Structure formats: C-alpha cells, structure tokens
Image (cartoon, rainbow, N blue to C red):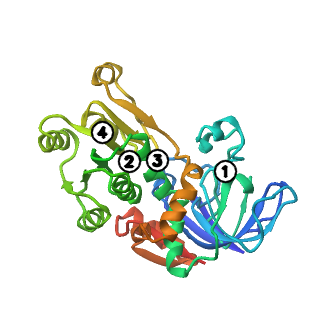
Amino acid sequence: MKATMLYGPRDVRFEERPDPTIIQPTDAILRISAACVCGSDLWPYRGIEPTTQPRPMGHEYVGIVETVGSAVKNIQPGQFVVGSFATSDNTCPHCQHGYQSSCEQREFMSAAQAPLLRVPQADGTLVATPHIPSENLIPSLLTASDVLGTGWFAADAANVKPGATVVVVGDGAVGLLGALSAKQMGAERIIVMSRHETRQKLALEFGATDIVTERGDEGVARIKELTRGLGADSVLECVGTQESLMQSIRATRPGGHVGFVGVFHGVEIPGGEFFFSHVHLHGGPAPVRRYLPKLIDLILSQKIDPGKVFDLRLPLDQVAEGYRAMDERRAIKALLLP
C-alpha cells in the first residue's frame, strides 16, 4: 500500500509502505474509511517538533475492521469503528478513572493517513457503531477520534456548566468544536477569539455568541469589558503557546477554570501570578475514549454536525496539499478519503 511519511520540515511523501499486520493478539487491522490532517501534525511539519528520521503520519481515523487478533473479544470484522488517537486497554486504574490517554499500556497512534491501519489494544481503544453509518455522517464521526473529543475535554476540564460564560482561545478545529461542546453543555455566552472571517462564521454556527479579534493583553481587556470586569467562568485554551495560555489564565475570573488542550511548546507558567489568580488549571492529552460513546450517539442522532470543520476534501494521495493548505491557513481542516 501507499501511506503518508514525513521526512522533515514541509517534506510530506505518499509512498510505498508494507501493509500492517497483526503483531500482538490484542491488535486489529482497519480499512480506513476516512482520515485527516490534525493541527498538531503541523508542529513537526513546520520543524518546530524535530523529525530525526522518516515517520508515518496520521492519528485520526474511522474505518471497517478487517481482522482482529486472537485476544480481541469485543470488536469484530465487518464493524465500523471510531478510535482514539491514544490507545488504551480501558481496564487499568487510569482508564477506570476516565483518563484513558494515560493508560498504563498507552501508545500514541500514527500511520492513519493510509488505506490500512493497525490499532493496538483494539478492545479498549475502538468503539463500534450500531450499524454501518451513512456516508454523510463519516466526517463527523471522524472528528470524534480527536478534534471533537479534544474540544469536549477542553470544555469538560474548564468545568463548563449551564448558564456559564465561556471564552475559547484558538479558532482551529479544536477551538471551534470546543465552542460546539460548550454549547452542548449549556453555556449561555460563548466568546470565541478569532481574526479569520470563515472561522468566525463557523464559530457562530456552532454556538458562539461573541467574536473577539484582539489578542494578548488587548484580548484580555476586551474579555474583561464584555464580562463587566469579572472575567470568564471557563476558558478553553486550544493553541499551546505561552501567549495563548497566559491570555487564557488572565481572562478567567478568580475561581474560574482553564481547560488546556493545545500541545504545549515553549510554555512556562509564572508561579507568582498563577498563585494569586485563584484559577483552576486542568488539561493535557484528551481522554477521547471516555467520551466516544456519547459523542457517537450525538452524531448518529444528528444532534450535532461537527464534520463542518472539514472545509477541504482531498483524495488520500494528495495528502501533501492538505498539509500545505492547513499550514498556510487556507483550510481549517483537511479530510482525506482513500
């Protein structure tokens, strides 16, 4: 088969690779129905996260089970499944507490931008849909694999409650779906910080009530102005930079919550300022597996349509263009169809 490999900064190739096979008895092999490019893929693509040797790419996936290992009991060939970007046995103490992305047997998925994919810990990582979904629902189900699950965790970690005022920092796919998640959780006011018209429009479709274009200290001042000097109850940090995290903390009211899901790069938290802020800070790699059953149900019942974040559809062999379009911010998120 041909699959996606990253050789170095902005060097994505679609080339011949061996077909995946069952290695462990807990494995499953999927035929991919859809994959995509993630915002976090852009860190190595841009060279911010070093690539020392060619690496397979892609960690968001849905597909049909082709075969399973001898120890797999709950997942069967022929099922349509959604899987998390982090594998989990779903039985260890961390999994039982709802933090499957810290599973004792965790592996971070890669190689999903390909026609076939090996998934370790299939029973604990994959969730099967009740039936084969219609084609129009596949993009939305794909978002549950990461960006929707991550946006949902951002809102959950930020303790979004009915009637809350919520700020979303970051207008990528995760931030936009964080706004959708906050809406589902009953937030009354959702303020999305964005300078891009197409992303602003989608944020409003997903439930945003206000758009703030200012950043940094000016952005914080604008949030304080909109909240009568108090700050937000909940802030979703969906970028991962020093500026975005400090903007998030400073825009939160004392006693409020920041849910951070942007992968940190070069971030340091000033202890003195954080100590006196009285802000709750929680986040990390999203335990997507915890939320998959609920998110799949919301999608199949068509109560939400998160697949709207895909504004570029490409055949899988044009994956390099998907990376370029997202890197140049010509696309919010690129859907890849084998």
Please tell me which of labels 4 and 1 falls first in the chain. 1
Q: Position of residue 175 (x, y in %)?
A: 36, 54
Provide the secondary structure element on which disc 1 rests: loop
For residue 76, side relative to residue 48 (left or right): right
Q: Which is closer to the viewer, label 2 or label 4? A: 4
Q: Nearer the viewer, residue 332 or 230?
A: 230
Whether residue 120 is visible, yes or no, is no
- From this view, report whether residue 89 is shown above or below residue 333: above
Residue drawn at 33 percent across, 20 percent down? 275
For the residue carrying disc 4, how many other residues have a C-alpha within 10 Å: few (<14), some (14-19), or many (20+)? many
Which residue corresponds to mark 4?
248
Question: CA separation, marks 1 and 3?
Answer: 17 Å
In whole angstroms, how far apart are the C-alphas of marks 1 and 2? 23 Å
Q: Position of residue 207 (x, y in %)?
A: 29, 60
Q: Which mark is residue 239?
A: 2
Residue labelled with disc 1: 87
- Of labels 1 and 2, earlier in sequence is 1
- Which one is in front in this view, the residue at disc 1 or the one at disc 3? 3
Query: Label 2 amino acid?
Result: Val
Task: Tell us which disc is closer to us: 3 or 2.
Answer: 3
Percent x, y of residue 140 = 48, 69
Q: Residues within 10 Å of mark 3 (few under 14, many from 20)?
A: many
* First in residue order: circle 2 vs circle 4: 2
**Is the residue 335 above or below the residue 11 in the image?**
below
Label of residue 226 in the image = none
Q: Looking at the picture, which amino acid does disc 1 mark?
A: Thr
**Type of the residue with mark 4:** Ser
Q: Which mark is residue 153?
A: 3
Cα distance between the residues tagged 4 and 1: 29 Å
Q: Is residue 7 left or right of residue 298?
A: right
Q: At label 3, which amino acid type do we have?
A: Phe
**Upstream in sequence: badge 3 or badge 2:** 3
